[in-house]
Image: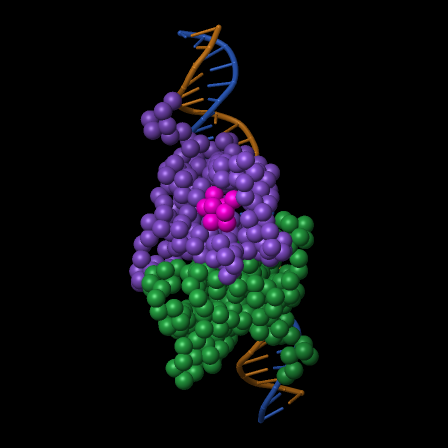
Chain colours: A green, B purple, C blue, D orange
Amino acid sequence: MSSSQKSSTKEKILIAAEHLLAEHGFEAVSLRDITNTAEVNVAAVNYHFGSKEKLFDAVQCRYINPINEHRLELLGDIAEGGKTADVREILDAFMRPFLSMVTQSELKEQMFFKLMGRCISDKHGDLPEEALPLLEKMAQAFTEAMAKALPELPIDQLMWRLHYTFGVMAHTLIHADTLRKLTNGVCGEPDMETQLKWMIDFCHAGFINGKSV
Amino acid sequence: MSSSQKSSTKEKILIAAEHLLAEHGFEAVSLRDITNTAEVNVAAVNYHFGSKEKLFDAVQCRYINPINEHRLELLGDIAEGGKTADVREILDAFMRPFLSMVTQSELKEQMFFKLMGRCISDKHGDLPEEALPLLEKMAQAFTEAMAKALPELPIDQLMWRLHYTFGVMAHTLIHADTLRKLTNGVCGEPDMETQLKWMIDFCHAGFINGKSV
DNA sequence: TTGTAATTTAAGCGATTGATTGAATCATGT
DNA sequence: ACATGATTCAATCAATCGCTTAAATTACAA
């Protein structure tokens, strides 16, 4: 029963897939790459998941759905009683669940970030069906909260800025180590909390854009 | 001699590859996808380019190198005589060459943006060798210019903010139409100049982050 | 026109892809 | 011990992958 006792074939596949998809992306990994890493038979994937595509869906849903639930939960907390949430609080509620989730996953920090970044950027955005309803609900809730916090900002600009925020997160998650290599380490190794603060600072400034907080 | 007269096999391949790579990404397109679209023989790719990988390199270099040259040129203009360039000017010099290039390419606007975005995000950053020296020169020049414009900003934070700026651009380029679909058109259809201004506004605010301009 | 090089073509190479099969093995309850 | 269902296995499928070959075709200079 204990998960640490021995991992089932299904979990071994999931874990191997997570690592390989994070490292090489969704298009570049074959079933045999995964089953060799997981040290299981090729047929096990189709037995346990039905197809390669459904395995990928499972990998994505494993973290995306809990993260979006956590986002809605945090947003609900800061907006309780109908009070208007602060822009910074909203951005924090949007980004922080990634950091909470990384401690729960069995993936190394960087691996987890890259995997999440790929869920956003790879496969030109076709997330699994099981993730879409919650995702849209989350997107709508954050759009509304942000519109309430910035009532003067036109809705189209607001949406594009949310889009930019998504871009900052995705690019940072995927290419963090690329930046480290490119700059010979000058960019430092900020811990997760610092990384989060910097991203929120950047996007917060971009959202309020000169106006007073 | 005239390019409009008839396109050579080599150019037909390049054009087909540009469209398909923009639409589906670098990992998901096969040689036969390209040659079928271009209406040429499969062997033509290896005859004219040497390999699939070198064809992809050629597709990327076709626009990336001129864009980076244009960036350095614009940055040189605004920093001439040793004067310190403004943050907004630097961001403009960084982003604008994309817009200048789209009018020169034979690709539709959205296609071109998606292709450029994929050059940044796909293949976990392994750009062709022929593009790297100029890219690094450009990156260093913009880092220095930005450091001069924001002397109080620690170098590591500055680099991360440049990284965020890259993310805003890449994500916007690739997923512009995704946003349009997701929001049922509420996000509008801003023209290129507006799109550029909005991105620069967002990143500019993120860079100066509350400090006076 | 003839000779030579450049280009295009159809056919096929070995390797790998996702998926399937039926038999072997394992686990579990009676 | 036996039966039953769940799981794993080696073997193999057709399809597609990037790439190569040798012959046919074209372009062009002498």
> What x and y, as percent, mark residue B85?
52, 44
Residue located at (39% from left, 36% from top): B104
Q: Is the magenta stretch mostly helix, strand or loop?
A: helix
Task: Locate residue A165 relative to residue A30 in the image: left or right.
Answer: left
Count the marks: how many?
0
Vertical side of D17 occupied by A26: above or below: below
Q: Which of A72 and A13 is in front in this view?
A: A72
> What x and y, as percent, mark residue B59?
48, 39
Residue located at (52% from left, 34% from top): B49
Task: Locate residue A7 relative to residue B208 in the image: left or right.
Answer: right
Q: Does the magenta stretch include residue B90?
A: yes
Residue located at (56% from left, 45% from top): B145
Vertical side of A170 occupied by C10: above or below: above
Q: Quick one: quadrant of the N terminus of chain B?
A: top left
Where, by quadrant of the figure, is residue A98 drawn? Answer: bottom right
Q: Is residue A82 magenta?
A: no
Q: What stretch is highlighted in magenta?
A: B85-93
Mark yes or no: residue A50 visible.
no
Q: Which of B141 and B19 is in front in this view?
A: B141
Q: Which of A86 and C3 is in front in this view?
A: A86
Q: Which of A57 and B172 is in front in this view?
A: B172
> What x and y, as percent, mark residue A174?
56, 58
Vertical side of B84 occupied by A59: above or below: below
> What x and y, as percent, mark residue A79?
43, 79
Vertical side of C24 occupied by B92: above or below: above
Task: Locate residue B4 relative to residue A43 in the image: left or right.
Answer: left
Mark yes or no: residue B96 visible.
yes
Residue located at (47% from left, 49% from top): B88
